[in-house]
Amino acid sequence: MSVTEEAATLLYVEDEFLTQESVAAALRDAGFSVVTADSGAHAVDILEAAAEPFRGLITDINLGDGPDGWEVARRARELVDGLPVVYVSGASQHDWTSQGVPQSVMVPKPFAPIQIVVAVSGLLNTAAN
């Protein structure tokens, strides 16, 4: 059974509504359960309330006021060791090697939603083996 058949629950953090909706829909179409957050603070609140059900995190980097995607991912990894992380960014991808958590993936904007599905599926399948 593949990871997507298990309806893995993902946290997706994106402050741009249309991007959030299109990527969340693609992830759901691929068989994932998706919880969305529109800010870093909202994402941290969700994680601190119940991080265990999440099998992966997808986060934009620039999220406005409050924690950015780098901080969200670091907090998520403190709560769930080895949680697969996919970063998306239009301007911060050059900081990934210094700011990103180990064994994460960066997908630069603009991207097709299927690229996020492929990236998170790859990380989840690697983590499962």
Image: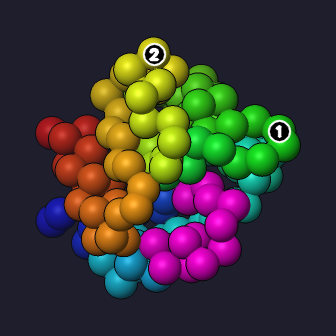
Q: Identify the mark nearer the N-term, 1 or 2.
A: 1
SS for dot 2? helix
Q: Quadrant of the N terminus?
A: bottom left
Residue 26 pos. (x, y %): 39, 78
Quadrant housing residue 72: top right
Magenta segment includes 35: no
Crowd around label 2: few <14 · some 14–19 · many ≥20 (10 Å): few
C-alpha distance separating marks 1 and 2? 20 Å
Q: Which residue is drawn at the image coordinates 19% and 41% (left, top)?
A: 126
Dot 2 corresponds to which residue? 98
SS for dot 1? loop
Whether 105 is drawn above or below 107: the answer is: above
Say left or right for 32 vs 77.
left
Say left or right for 54 vs 122.
right
Residue 123 pos. (x, y %): 27, 45
Q: Is residue 67 visible?
A: yes
* Amino acid under disc 2: Ser
Q: Which residue is drawn at the image coordinates 60% and 78% (left, top)?
A: 18
Residue 62 pos. (x, y %): 65, 44
Q: Which residue is drawn at the image coordinates 32% and 54% (left, top)?
A: 120
Quadrant housing residue 114: bottom left
Q: Identify the magenta region.
A: 11-23
In depth, the one of 116 and 129 nearer the eye is 116
Crowd around label 1: few <14 · some 14–19 · many ≥20 (10 Å): few
Q: Residue furthest front?
A: 91
Q: Which residue is drawn at the image coordinates 31% and 28% (left, top)?
A: 103
* Amino acid under disc 1: Gly
